[in-house]
Amino acid sequence: MEITLTHYLLLAMVLFLTGMVGFVLRRNAIVMLMCVELMLCSVNIVFAAFSRFHASADGHVFVLMNFAVAAAEAAIGLAILVEIFRRRRTVNVDDLKALME
Amino acid sequence: MDSHTTETLLRWIVLVPLLGAAVGGLLNRRLPKKVAGLMACGTVGVSFALSVTVFLRLTRMPAAERFVSDTMATWIGFGNLQVDLGFSMDPLSGVMALVVTGVGFLIHIYSLGYMAHDEGFSRFFAYLNLFIFAMMTLVLGENLLMLFVGWEGVGLCSYLLISFWFNDEANAAAGKKAFIVNRVGDFGFLLGIFLIGVTLMPHLGQGEGLLSFRTLQHHSGLMAPVATAICLLLFLGATGKSAQIPLYIWLPDAMAGPTPVSALIHAATMVTAGVYMVARMNFLFILSPTAMTVVAAVGVVTAIFAATIALTQNDIKKVLAYSTVSQLGYMMLACGVGAFGIGIFHVMTHAFFKALLFLGSGSVIHAMSNEQDMRVMGGLKDKLPVTYWTFLVGTLALAGIFPLAGFFSKDEILWKAFSSDLGGVLPWAIGFLAAGLTAFYMMRLVVLTFFGENRASAEVRSHIHESPATMTMPLVILAVLSVVGGWIGWPHFMGGGAWFEQWLEPVFAGTHAADHGGHGVITHAMETAGHVATGGHAAGEAMHDTMMEWILAGASLVWGLLGLSVGWFVYMKKISIATAFRNMAGGFPHKVLLNKYYVDEAYEGTFIRPGYRLSKSILWKIVDAGLIDGLLVNGSALVVAITGSMLRLFQNGMVRFYAWSFTVGVTVFVLYLSFSG
């Protein structure tokens, strides 16, 4: 069986939905961060697939940039979480409502 | 357009006093009095010298080309709307410039003495300089908009100087009254300018200054259909500035200001701005017989109306103020019958003798320790000899006694009112009557002030002294001018050349069609002689006119002398006559005159109080409190508050809720984009 663009897109969709549903349903901030990474990853797959099948390097450029963004996001996100955990002894997002008002 | 002769001195005539005002006003009390005073006088002196220089240059030019201009910049350049920031001088504005800076200079010097002990000395001179700047902008402005800038500028200075001693509530109120009444007139003036702009704009070529007087004159034909409306609107402005009925009410109150201000602004210069403007726009006014009739009627009615009020006033400055209103009426009458040149002639002679009278009254007030009520004056003749003699000269000039300045201009106005196609017997008769009243009330003033026993308290009496030289010198100079100033208009029928009229002729060239009186009679008669074979008839007509002129002039002179003698007789010999008049018909006529026909009260009842009530009940409580504060301000705040409290439901702090809404939103959006095509 030949692997076509559709396969890549399906894979990306599954990954993206997993990440999205996880982000919405889970309460642990660390898991939510991981879900975000998952969604970014699926987007990377789409970029790479289109790039490959359209024979254009543009997609790769975006993928590289996405890596950088994802890395930065993870770094800052985790740093914030660590700090929150130190103060509140929890990373449950439902308990973090201090900025509501 | 004709060739322009550039004269860069013009801008300095205007700007030097502004410089003086800026320095004097900014440094104010940090400046020693001596420096402030000398600087103010110096700048006006420079302005006067420059005016003379440019004026002399004009005289050396051929009559038809007497026009110099100085364009500094383009003020407004927008499509074919072009207004320049520039000045120009022609025979008319030349005369005005000389009068304003010349009389202004004398009054500046006088003020050195009069204001010597005043705390606001520097401030006073800064205002005076600012006034000269504004007035020169008005006079030398090259277009109607520049004139308007000056017009508003002098209004501001008038306000500042009337309420100069603002610690007294009454003075501040007088200043406000002057300003507000003038605004009513200015509103008409502005509308007039707009109407001119709207009418002319579509017809102008590139580079033609829209409101430049030369353009207006050139295209005056285009404005003929709306000339009546334009002229009446402009004239409304003139009634405000030149204190004509119905807007004259501010001028008598304006006497609250220091006396030099009354002399400079409210007698000699600013109040003649309306006359100047009407004369400047003569080419438009002449297109509308209706407007001319209105101008003449308002002028002559104002002349008699104010003269009757002046009969009963007890404040020395109030008498002079009503006299000024009355004389301004004469000037308007002259303009209204097409004799613009004579109107300006009277502006000039009046500037001399009325400035003299006001400064003289200032000298009296100074001597009397700031007392202005004539009932407690009297017998000042020997104590203030210079003031007395110069004041007498001014009185005779105002009364129109030959050969003083007032005789020539006033007599010529009456003659034009009688002989011009736009005039007739009625305006002449009213003007003639007012002239007699003028002589009478001036004599009353002189007798009450300078003759008889002194009626002041002993303390005041011991302080009476003649004013210092800085004050008497200008009096003497103005007295000389009041005597000889009229001679430049020595009329033809008396063997003179009417040089003044000739000088202004190029400016009013277009108005000759309507002017058959005086100098015009002869040329007109000659034309008739050319057309009609019987030249003898026309010559006879001219002879007849000359005869008539002699008769009327003689009558004016006799009438003036009569007014003076009656005034002398009543107040010197038989004061019982005055008392009898006062008690006539239950004292009612006297009371009406003393209370100025209750015009102020009538305005209070018809405009001020209803306006106040309207403001309070509708404009304040409904429009301001209800509509603006309630609906617009608080209403918009309420909308924001409600929207906010609704949006706030979405900010519940649940990150997962945000994510969920975000997801749903994106999904809906993407679906919409996919299926909407």
Image: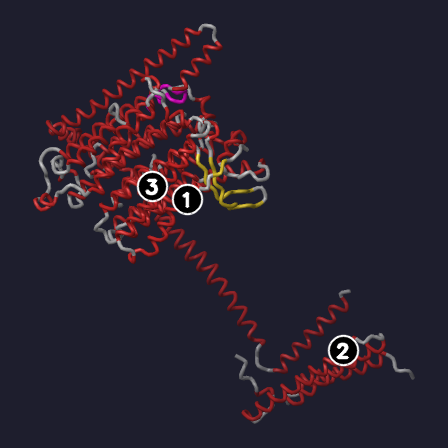
Q: Is residue A40 visible?
A: yes
Residue visible at 54% across and 92% down? Answer: A87
Q: Which residue is mark 2?
A: A61
Q: CA distance from mark 3 to mark 1?
A: 46 Å
Q: Position of residue B541 (x, y in %)?
A: 39, 11
Q: Dot 3 falls on which chain?
A: B
Classify mark 1: helix, strand or loop: helix
Q: Which residue is mark 1?
A: B12
Nearest the eye: B413 or B579: B413
Nearest the eye: B617 or B150: B150
Classify mark 3: helix, strand or loop: helix
Q: How dense is the environment of label 3, judged by Cα within 10 Å: few (below 14), some, or many (20 and up)?
A: few
Q: Position of residue B647 (x, y in %)?
A: 57, 72
Task: Name which residue type carries label 2.
Answer: Val
Residue visible at 61% across and 82% down? Answer: B655
Q: Nearer the viewer, mark 2 or mark 3?
A: 2
Q: CA distance from mark 2 to mark 3?
A: 82 Å
The stretch of residues the image draws in magenta is B413-423
Nearest the eye: B311 or B602: B311
Q: Is residue B5 above or below residue A94?
A: above
Magenta segment main secondary structure: helix
- B243 sits left or right of B588 in the view: right
Which colour scheme appears in the figure?
A: secondary structure
Q: How dense is the environment of label 2, judged by Cα within 10 Å: few (below 14), some, or many (20 and up)?
A: few
Q: Position of residue B167 (x, y in %)?
A: 25, 53
> Which quadrant holds residue B44?
top left
Q: Dot 1 falls on which chain?
A: B
Q: Which mark is residue B606?
A: 3
3 or 1: tag closer to the N-terminus: 1
